[in-house]
Amino acid sequence: MNTSMKSATAFLAGITALLLAGCNVGPKYQRPAVTAPPAFRGPDETAVSSDAKDSLGDEQWSAVFREPELQDLIRQALANNYDLRVAAERVLEAQSQIRITRAAGLPTLTVGGTGIGADLPSSLGSTLGGNNPLSFGSFNLSAAWTPDFWGLYRKQTEAARDQMLAQAWAQRAVRMTLVGQVATSYFTLRSLDQQLEVAKQTLKARQDSLDLTKRLEHGGSAPLSDVRQAEQLLYTASAEIPQLQEQIQQQENAMSLLLGKPPGPVAHTDPSALSPVPQDLPVGIPSQLLERRPDIQQTEAQLKAANAQVGVAKAQFFPQLSISASAGVGGDSLSNIFDPAGKTIYGLGTLTQPIFEGGKLRGQYELSKQQKEELVLTYQKTILTAFRDVSNSLIAVNKQHATRAEQQKLVEAAQDATRLARIRYEGGSTAYLEVLTTDTNLFNAQLNLINAEQSEALSLVQLYQALGGGWQQ
């Protein structure tokens, strides 16, 4: 190799190394400052905290929801739910987008060839002065590369990776939401089941009361108005039954959709499903939510992508260098296509620098910064929303437990009042209106107690989700 060739090679190597080292314009990501409270606000202005390593949100869903029926339903949903499967596909789409974006900064290499052949008549071949048959062939190889000197493609790839990460956290958020939806639907079904059972028991008791009233009326001991009032009680209970059956079947259809199945019945017979929720549940410290809550992680990944897009927009201001080269061989017959004498080699380099684009580049840059600032605010609001969710859930767990206890006392009092009213009526000491009133109060109190039990069970679901639990594999 002669001296000039060595100098040229060294120069090109130096340029290549410089281009590869390049620059990476754009701001470096820094997590926005968010002041987390030292403890969660609990009921009655109390602060609730525990060991940082001890939180309900870190528990597997199977350790929180222990009913075998519910666990089986959750497993079916996690395996078959369409929203969760769609979220998984979106993660795969984002991964493919990373490969597409990254490829823009890599060299491209293409190969091609041409071949022409014709069998000419002897007279025409002689006239044209060519051989018979006439043929021509070529083979060429070309390459192109736009060095990423300013980090344009690197920033685009970084943004694509962050968007993929955001989709991954979105998938986890769907999983967490799905676990909560299945548990909520199951507890709602068990509540409706118990309300239906109460309605059927009440219907039987009121039928017995109506029969008694009719006997008293036939014997002249009670007016016909008492019979009509007893019938009102009976029909009130009987009208409640088909409404509850309707809600149960519709709720089963909703559950079937979560399970990825056609509408149909699902299992919901566990008698302990609406048992009281344990008190003093561990919640950890508020700063843990930044790492555990999928919605916070998703928003931060989107913020990182927006930060990278600022670098993409800034890189557009700088010159872009494109390098291309091509080499080929050709000949008029197959035997001499690869003859070195027929080779062609050329290279081309272009350097473009934006000068005036009517403010487009500046507008793109300002837009990217504004979008980043918008996501900063969204990120900060998402964190505050998470703190609020936990506080509301802690308050709900405590107050729903108290409501359930008081409602239980109300039912016991209403039962005794109804018993005494029936004794007084049968003894002729009071009108049937007292029986009507106390029986109606008892029926409503029993239904309200079941609703209170359901609300307390749902408060556990809400607290678990608020703490970011349910997405862990």
Image: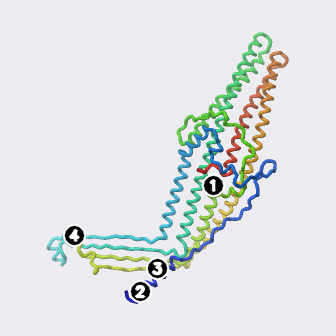
| Nearest-to-viewer mark from 3 and 4 | 3
Pick whichever of labels 3 and 4 is earlier in the sequence.
4
- Mark 1 sits on what residue? 294
In whole angstroms, how far apart are the C-alphas of marks 3 and 1?
A: 46 Å
Residue behind mark 3: 350
Q: Quadrant location of residue 150?
A: bottom right
First in residue order: circle 3 vs circle 2: 2
Front residue of 344/280: it is 280
Q: CA distance from mark 1 to mark 4?
A: 68 Å
Closer to the eye: label 3 or 1: 1
Percent across and percent down for residue 178 are 60, 46
Taking depth in this image into account, of 234 and 192 the one nearest to the observer is 192
- At label 4, the amino acid type is Ala
Give amino acid for label 2.
Lys
Marks 3 and 4, Cα distance to the nearest angstrom? 40 Å
Q: Which numbered disc covers residue 6?
A: 2
